[in-house]
Amino acid sequence: MKSQEWKLALFLVVIAVAGVFASSSFIETFGNPGGDRSLYQVSTIGALLEGVYDGETEIGTLLENGDTGIGTLNALDGELIILDGRVWQVRGDGSVHAVDPSMKTPYATVTCFTPDISLDLAGPLDLPALEEAIKDAMPSENLPCAVQIKGTFVNLTARSVDRQEIPYPPLVEATADQHLFSFGRTEGTAVGFYFPSYLEGVGVPGFHLHFLADDRSGGGHLLGCTAERVRVQIHSTPQFDLNLPSNGPFLEIGLSGDRSEDINASEKGR
């Protein structure tokens, strides 16, 4: 073999070996490198805070872009939970209903969930401790992540809200009349997203989780719990597809300024 041909062959071998090592490292870290790593979101939490409760996006469109997620329905009609491609509504009275794909949402986030990281946790862990354990396992606190937490919970508190009437009140006022649901011991799944703090106003910074009981007897926006024994799965989503309303009050409202106080009051129960 000529000298130049030998060097070229050696170069190609080195490139191939490097590619194998790079691929192996990626799979070990992120699980499925070919999976969908995007979030699909309708509107923003900032708009919801201002009472923009009528949406343009059908639930069927959400399902075309993801099989896992959370949100709400038109007129802030309860809490929305999407698991395994099925869509559930927890109404203000606590009842759980399947959602027709033709219904619309003013605010929701979904992704095609493929777990990159899985961990089993044995409690008791209250919600702040559970969230810290998940953050410790995430690849970075600077990337949005989808989260599923499945297992046994005790002392769980969830909420939902009643359908609102026009003129819509701001979210802080609507959630002031929220309905609380307590579960002494239950099997179910908490699902939702972690958003970095720099995305405040687009999403809820930190964790935003909804709960659905395995027997579909209840659920809602998760406010507190003690995890007894759970499996946590994390899906990193560095790509973001944000779909904003193209007409209506969204075009007129003010969305600037610090929204942390309103978010804490309406979404975190603080």
Image (tube, rainbow, N blue to C red):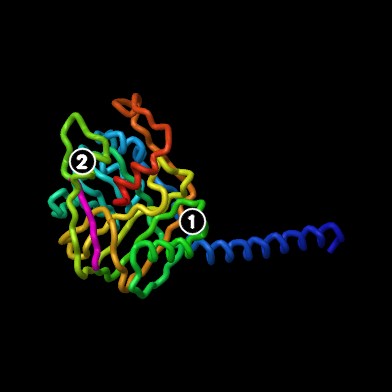
Say whether residue 169 is visible.
yes
- CA gap between label 2 and label 1 equals 31 Å
Tell me the SS state at disc 2: loop
- The magenta segment is 155-161
Say whether residue 63 is visible.
no
Crowdedness near tag 2: few (<14), some (14–19) or many (≥20) residues, C-alpha within 10 Å: some
In terms of image quadrants, where is residue 226? bottom left
Please name the predominant secondary structure of the magenta segment in the image. Answer: strand
- Is label 2 in contact with label 1 (beta carbons under 8 Å)? no
Residue 2, relative to residue 56: is it above or below?
Answer: below
Residue wearing tag 2? 103
Residue wearing tag 1? 34
Residue 146, relative to residue 62: is it above or below?
Answer: below
Which amino acid lies under the numbered mark 1 shown in the image of this protein?
Gly
Residue 80, relative to residue 147: is it above or below?
Answer: above
Q: Residue at x 64, y 61 (%)?
A: 19
Left or right: 46, with 10 as reference point: left
Give yes or no for residue 42 being in the magenta stretch.
no
x and y percentages locating residue 157 in the rendered image: 23, 60
